[in-house]
Image (cartoon, helix red, strand yellow):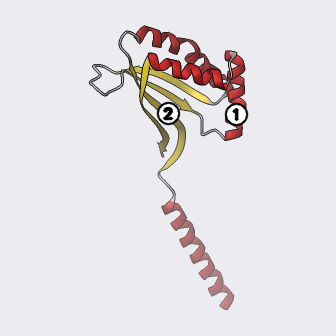
Amino acid sequence: MKSIKKALLIGTVALSISTIALAQESSYTYGTVWEAHGIRVLPGQFENYMDHLAGSWKDVYEFAKKEGHVVDYHVLATNHAREGEPDLILVVEYKDYIKTAEYEAFQKKIDEMLSTNERQADKEFGDRESMRKTLSSSQYHELNLK
């Protein structure tokens, strides 16, 4: 008789634990990682900056898509940007966060593709300050609702 009571007790406890676990299960799962950069293009530099985006910027993200790191990327124009607001939003959707070692290996591939190195790339980044000013950078983790 004790073993039956014990089995029933264990079964009841197991059932209540699984019910609690189901009740605690989240109503979402993590999705892709999004990065957004708000850009103010300086007067007279819009076409020059768009040339940059259509050139090496696009090449990097197309390569990143082929390598499986990036899902997609977008250049969004702000309609009627007011003072202090960006003219463009550059949005990149990443498959997931990337580990440091993976990033370093990927960066080497980018440098080879662009025939550059980190010092030269850093200088070119600074040179673009004559065309634009980065107003904001944000990163978001998509939550997929179940």
**Coordinates of residue 6 in the picture (x, y in percent):** 64, 85
Name the residue type under label 2: Glu
Give the number of callouts.
2
- Using the rendered view, name the quadrant where residue 80 is placed: top left
Q: Residue 104, labelled with which disc?
A: 1
- Using the rendered view, name the quadrant where residue 46 is placed: top left
Secondary structure category for the residue under label 2:
strand
User: Rounded to the nearest whole Å, what is the CA distance between mark 1 and mark 2?
Assistant: 19 Å
- Using the rendered view, name the quadrant where residue 110 is placed: top right
Q: Is residue 9 above or below residue 45?
A: below
Q: Nearer the viewer, mark 1 or mark 2?
A: 1
Judging by the rendered image, the residue that carries numbered circle 2 is 35
Measuring 64% from the left and 38% from the top, which residue is drawn there?
98
Measuring 62% from the left and 86% from the top, which residue is drawn there?
5
**Label whose residue precedes the other's in the sequence (1 or 2):** 2
Measuring 54% from the left and 37% from the top, which residue is drawn there?
32
